[in-house]
Amino acid sequence: MPGYVIGQLKEITNADGFGAYQGAAGPTVVQYGGKMNWVSTGVESGDGDWSPMGVILFEFESSEQARK
């Protein structure tokens, strides 16, 4: 059964640092068998004050693999 990791992006305060992070994070996700399944920067909250700048979903072959 697949395992998933959901991330939310609240704000980017250092664009260069964020770019470097993306460059390192992508290969790390792949190293553990993960793939980016969905990403959105057009997030709308149905209720409450949750308002991330973006949301991303990674899929792994299992929840155990996702935890690694």
Image (cartoon, rainbow, N blue to C red):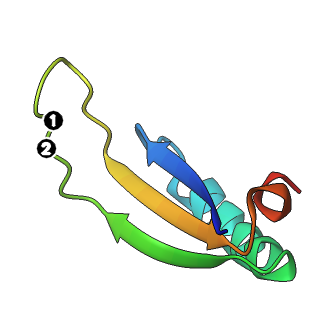
Do the CB atoms of the residues marked 2 and 1 lie less than 8 Å apart?
Answer: yes
Task: State the residue lying farthest toward the front.
Answer: 1
Q: Residue at x 41, y 37 (%)?
A: 10
Q: Which mark is residue 1?
A: none
Element assignment for label 2: loop
Measured as percent of width and height from the top left, residue 44 is found at 13, 44
Q: Image check: 63 left or right of 32?
A: left
In this view, 46 is above or below 25: above
Q: Residue at x 17, y 17 (%)?
A: 48
Mark 1, Cα crowd under 10 Å, few <14 / some 14-19 / many 20+, is few
Q: Which mark is residue 45?
A: 1
Q: Image check: 15 left or right of 2?
A: left
Task: Please state which of residues 2 and 26 is positioned toward the viewer in this rendering.
Answer: 2
Q: Which quadrant holds the N terminus? A: bottom right
Q: Residue at x 20, y 49 (%)?
A: 43
Measured as percent of width and height from the top left, residue 61 is found at 73, 75
Quadrant in the picture for residue 50: top left
Residue type at tag 2: Glu
Task: Please state which of residues 53 and 43 is positioned toward the viewer in this rendering.
Answer: 43
Count of numbered circles in the view = 2
Residue type at tag 1: Ser
Mark 2, residue position: 44
In this view, 51 is above or below 15: above
Measured as percent of width and height from the top left, residue 3 is found at 66, 61
Q: How far apart are the two marked residues, 2 and 1, measured between alpha carbons?
A: 4 Å
Quadrant in the picture for residue 63: bottom right
Q: Image check: 48 left or right of 60?
A: left
Q: Which quadrant holds the C terminus? A: bottom right
Q: Image check: 46 left or right of 54?
A: left
Element assignment for label 1: loop
Task: Please state which of residues 45 and 26 is positioned toward the viewer in this rendering.
Answer: 45
